[in-house]
Amino acid sequence: MPLLFGTAGIPASAGERTSESGIRRIHELQLGAMELEFVQGVRMGEEKARSVGQVAMAEGIALSCHGPYWINLNSRESSKISASKERILHTARIAGILGARSVIFHPAFYHDDDHKLVLKRVVREISEIREILDAEGNQVVLRPETTGKGTQFGDLQEMITLAQLIPGVLPCIDFAHLHARSNGLNNSYDEFCYILEETAETLGERWNKNAHFHISGIEYGPKGEKRHLVLKESDLEYTALMKALQTFAVEGIVICESPNLEEDALLLQDIFLALEPGKEVSP
């Protein structure tokens, strides 16, 4: 299957609240991926990471990791930039032991700075992180994520540009965030196709064969994202989105961040598998 579907964290139906139990439950559900959520900090040691990685390998489940929320590579304080870089490095090092494919993170805030200047700063900081990881032999892909608010660095073009300029970096495209960031746009088959086409044309096969997406329902307002929603309780046109992914034959991972996690992950997977190339999408 060209896309693997999974959950952002341990499925709610897992028997125990452990990463190993979560991975086994993902396998039982016939999903293919799980993202380990280190959003409150990386609270996993090397021995535990080896154990979790062995379970994932045995069950055939692809892993990714979401880095801590406390990352801002455009902070006014140099100490906070240094701490942000250390958080990304720590996540990537544990991800490497886990055998995870990618590390996802929210890169920065604008702080009323010129957007081009912020981009330049973020490129510099992520390039330094990448150089350190490369020197350590760590090939985990760094994935800055498209963000859900206009105050956050992270529109589609910025994420594509980072991937263009820095080897070992590819975007995490969060469709719910792009929908919320635009206050309701980016929510049709044509718009989804535009997002995919822009990314594929610029980054080519290295992205098209190794993409990473976040999908959920989302509540938003004029300032962007408010909170994640169950897909059926949101206005996200997720069937059209699955059709766009099918049309572009993208390969990689789709992580569901809806509050009902595995239910919506299975819903997306079922829709994706049921759609045939060339089939019309209902309005």
Image: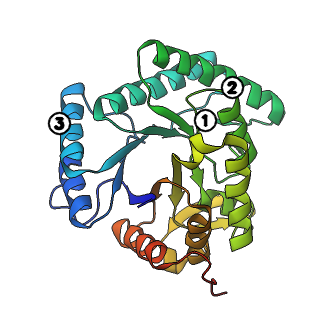
Q: Earlier in the sequence, mark 2 or mark 1?
A: 1
The amino acid on which the numbered mark 3 sits, given as a three-letter code, is Ser
Residue that carries the numbered disc 3 in the rendered image: 51
Q: Residue extending furthest top? A: 135
Residues at marks 2 and 1 touching, judged by CB atoms closer than 8 Å: no
Compared across the picture, whether 53 is left or right of 63 comes to left
Residue that carries the numbered disc 1 in the rendered image: 107
Q: Quadrant of the C terminus?
A: bottom right
Residue placed most toward the observer, 91 or 203: 203
Residue 237 location (% of width, % of height): 61, 76
Few, some or many C-alpha atoms within 10 Å of disc 1 (few <14, some 14-19, many ≥20)? many
124 to 10, vertically: above or below: above
Few, some or many C-alpha atoms within 10 Å of disc 3 (few <14, some 14-19, many ≥20)? some
Of badges 2 and 1, the one in the foreground is 2
Q: Which mark is residue 123?
A: 2
Residue placed most toward the observer, 105 or 152: 105
Q: Secondary structure at mark 3?
A: helix
Q: Earlier in the sequence, mark 3 or mark 2?
A: 3
The amino acid on which the numbered mark 1 sits, given as a three-letter code, is Pro
Q: Which mark is residue 23?
A: none
Q: Secondary structure at mark 2?
A: helix
